[in-house]
Image (cartoon, grey):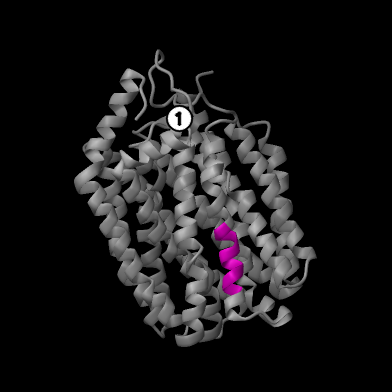
Amino acid sequence: MDRLHTNYRWHVVAMLWCISFFNYADRQAIFSVFPLLEKELGLSMVQLGLLGSAFAWVYGLSGFFAGFIVDRISRKKAILGGLYVWSIICMSTAFFRGFRALFVLRAAEGLGETMYYPASMSMVSDYHGKTTRSRAIGIHQTSVYAGTIAGGFFAGWIGQHYGWRWSFIVFGGMGILLGFVLNRFLHEPKRGQSDLSENESTTASLNFSQFGTLLRRTPTALCLVAAFMCSNFVAVVLLTWMPKFLFERFHMGLAVAGFTATFFVQAASVLGSLSGGWLADVLRTKTPRGRILVQATGVLCGAPFVAWCGMTRSVTMLIIALTCWGFCKGMYDANIFASLFDVVRPEARGTAAGFMNSVGWLGGGGSAPVLIGYIARDSGLSAGITAASTVYLAAGALLLIGAIFFVKRDSERMHASLEVGGQV
């Protein structure tokens, strides 16, 4: 069966969607029970921020090496193996007490999840070529939003009624069951099959030195990675601190705060991701700049709404701001890896995705919770959230630089190298 030219390529997206759902539900669950952890364990704002950063630090530190490994092993094994590991760690969180134990487990969960995105995005890129890649990744991206909503709301609801430990048991257990089911149906594709003709083949995977050379010769990739670091900083700020912000400023219950902090952003992001994926695929057929221009539009239009979230004292206005930011975020998110793969050959895509995750989570996600924790301690959460909007503007500037000066040349060079069978 030629899986590239059948509906199976969309079935792959659906299966990965389910795995990614639990990936993000497990990540988000802890933020909705911050007030319970603060009360039961006596944690400070900085310690809560460190719990958020622990995941990001390990996820980021191991991301590049995970991507390097993904380019050399079966991506199916990497994806399902990661699912089992992070689900078991998630369940284990329920059986430990104290800040140190929670910190270690959050860090370990980052290690467990680090394989997923390099492997899944590389797999999707082999089932979907340039005409459907943004749509496929955009559809997959909606799992991030659905999982974040579920993790935010249900973890808060379960924690409020049954205690915070049951949140981790439920999400971890369901992830393990999903892995057993999908093991039968998920299949490994030929590496590079969506970009190569029948007579072409990929070259050997790149070593560290060769990958460094690729980056130096591909400034578009560097712009995309730096922009992801900035955008991830903003996203982690809001995902980490918005439930507590709502709990304190508007006196919402845990479940309502967790739902409000995630639902409106993520629901709007679904629409933004689907729209951004479709628009980027259309524009990509007309210009190599298409995907990056959609991303730049998303972050530049989203920046004012991030500031609005921090400044408003009206629940209604906050919901409007979260919704508008979510739509803009979705436009950017749909093309994170599709834009990168426009300038990176198939045999280096796992490594490239892992490198992007490393920089984005170390430089952006790893610093965001703690930095905002310090700002909140001195000036309040409102000031920290508002300040994050300036980082979005930096992301937009980087994307415009890549679109205007570099992407056309880098894309043409990558496709030329495919035709002759050489490396970028």
Q: Secondary structure at mark 1?
A: helix
Classify residue 299 as left or right of residue 107. left
**Picture residue at 42% right of the left edge, 33% below the top:** 210
In the foreground, 6 or 389: 389
Give the residue at x 46% y 31%: 206
| Circle 1 residue | 347
Where 341 sits versus 49, above or below? above
Whole-percent x, y for residue 365 in the image: 49, 62
Q: Which span of residues is magenta-colored?
A: 48-57
Q: Position of residue 261 (x, y in %)?
A: 51, 71
Between 112 and 206, the one nearer to me in the picture: 206
Quadrant location of the N terminus?
top right
Q: List x then y, in percent, for residue 335.
A: 37, 47
Extreme residue toward the right, this view: 95
Q: Which secondary structure type mostly characterizes the magenta part of the structure?
A: helix
Is residue 53 found inside the magenta-colored segment of the image? yes
